[in-house]
Amino acid sequence: MNNIIFLGLAGAGKGTQAQILSDTIGIPMVSSGDLFRFHLSNKTELGIEANKYMSIGALVPDDTTINMILQRIGEEDCNNGFILDGFPRTLEQAESLHKAVNGQINCVVYIEVAENELVKRLSDRVICTIKTCNAILSKSAIGGIDSNCPKCDKPALSQRKDDLPEVVENRLKTQIPLIKQLVDYYNNKDILISVDGEQNVDMVESEIQMKLGINQ
Ligand code: AMP
């Protein structure tokens, strides 16, 4: 069983690293933010409800979020494990997850990045809206948002509304005290590893794989 959680503030690189690890060890990545955005793009009731919170940088209520994630990790492709990105974000979510999997969490990877670096990264972030691509990119590195996605070559790049500066500040303000609680919670269970998220993507990946004992 490979049940792994990625913890980190918005922009720390959780999604990127969770995807790399998922591709490396063949365990599905489950991202709460991607699930909410998927629901919203399909205009489901859940998506429309969640967007009321997402658009202002607030957390979606625990009940809704917990139900969505527990249902997703109960699907067949998660029989050998899951890699969670963006969940849990509150102690209540962590406790519900712990109960649902009978304490079977192997490891929590905490990606640490300073707050001022996060603000810079989030305002530069663009994503590919093609569901099968989902690339996360740097606007300055690819020369703007109007070019085609360098990964799938489709004209589908977009800046997340919650990456706009006024929302970013609110997201980080909400997240900082909560993440401290989660770090303590998993540290007390002795399953937390910390990784320096200010290195480049490859170096963060290497540090994670080394600390998880994955042969590269
Ligand atoms: P993310 O893509 O992880 O940055 O999430 C985008 C937004 O989705 C967040 O700002 C929240 O509004 C919502 N969201 C994602 N995960 C959670 C969670 N575990 N609990 C509550 N809200 C969440």
Image (cartoon, rainbow, N blue to C red):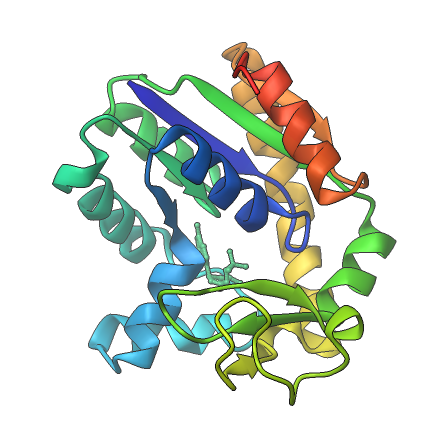
Residue at the image position 57 percent from the left and 20 percent from the top: 216
At 41% from the left edge and 17% from the top edge, which residue is drawn? 106
Q: Reply above or below: 99 against 198.
A: above
Please indicate whether residue 208 sits to the left or right of residue 55 in the image.
right
Q: Nearer the viewer, residue 50 or 109?
A: 109
Task: Count the labels in the image.
Answer: 0
Camera sees residue 31 = yes
As drawn, the residue found furthest toward the bottom would be 146
Task: Give percent across and percent down for residue 206.
Answer: 67, 27
Q: What is the residue that sits farthest to the right in this orientation? A: 116
Q: Is residue 102 left or right of residue 202?
A: left
Outermost residue toward the left in this view = 76
Q: Residue at x 51, y 73 (%)?
A: 128
Quarter of the rendering containing residue 73: top left
Displayed quadrant of residue 87: top left
Picture coordinates of residue 205 (x, y %)?
A: 64, 33
Name the foreground residue: 38 vs 168. 38
Q: Quadrant of residue 187?
A: top right
Q: Where 27 falls versus 33 (above or below)?
A: above
- Quarter containing the N terminus: top left
Say which residue appears at 60% left-offset and 71% top-offset: 150
Is residue 92 something that shows in the picture?
A: no
Q: Position of residue 169 (x, y in %)?
A: 74, 66
Q: Is residue 193 placed above or below 70 in the rendered structure?
A: above
Residue 50 place in picture, x, y as percent: 37, 70
Decide if residue 109 is on the left or right side of residue 145. Answer: left
